[in-house]
Image (spheres, rainbow, N blue to C red):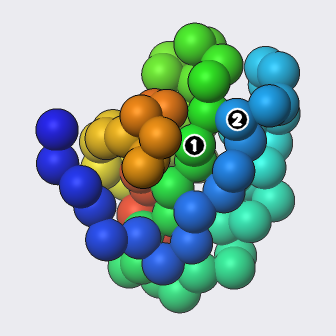
Amino acid sequence: MTAYDVALELDCRELPCPMPVIELARHLGDVEVGELLAVVARDPAAAVDVPAWCRMKEQDFVGADAADDGVARYVVRRLG
């Protein structure tokens, strides 16, 4: 797994579906265009929901890695 250097990491470990994607949408504007934003989530649906959201919202799903505690982290580049 690649460790991405992100500008903002959202801790959504305890949030059920669809809250990790809602938090992603809410905080996208908190990073500059071109910067990376990460969503850390235990919710297994996030593995599908985050890339799908990126396609719908024309953002760049960069990939996934793991947070320090091993929980999945989904990385998005803000395109606009």
Q: Measuring from the top left, give residue 19's x and y in whole percent.
A: 83, 33
Residue depicted at x 57% and y 43%: 40
Locate residue 30 relative to residue 26 in the image: left or right: left
32 or 79, which lies in front?
A: 32
Find disc 1 in the rendering and name its residue.
40
How would you rate the neighbour count of disc 2 (Cα within 10 Å): few for under 14, some for 14-19, many for 20 or more? Answer: some
Residue depicted at x 38% and y 79%: 34
Find disc 2 in the rendering and name its residue.
13
Q: Residue furthest front?
A: 69
Dividing the picture into quadrants, the one containing residue 56 is top right
Q: Is residue 69 visible?
A: yes
Where disc 2 sits, the SS reads loop
Q: Is residue 47 above or below residue 35?
A: above
Sequence-earlier tag: 1 or 2 = 2
Where disc 1 sits, the SS reads strand
In this figure, what is the number of numbered marks? 2
Dividing the picture into quadrants, the one containing residue 12 is top right
Q: Measuring from the top left, give residue 6's x and y in whole percent.
A: 41, 70
Quarter placement of the N terminus: top left
Q: Is residue 10 above or below residue 44?
A: below
Dividing the picture into quadrants, the one containing residue 20 is top right
Residue depicted at x 59% and y 80%: 31
Q: Is residue 47 above or below residue 60?
A: above
Q: Residue furthest bottom?
A: 32
Q: Are marks 1 and 2 in contact (CB under 8 Å)?
A: yes
Q: Amino acid at mark 2?
A: Arg
Distance between the alpha carbons at the discs numbered 1 and 2: 6 Å
Q: Amino acid at mark 1?
A: Val
Q: Is residue 73 visible?
A: no
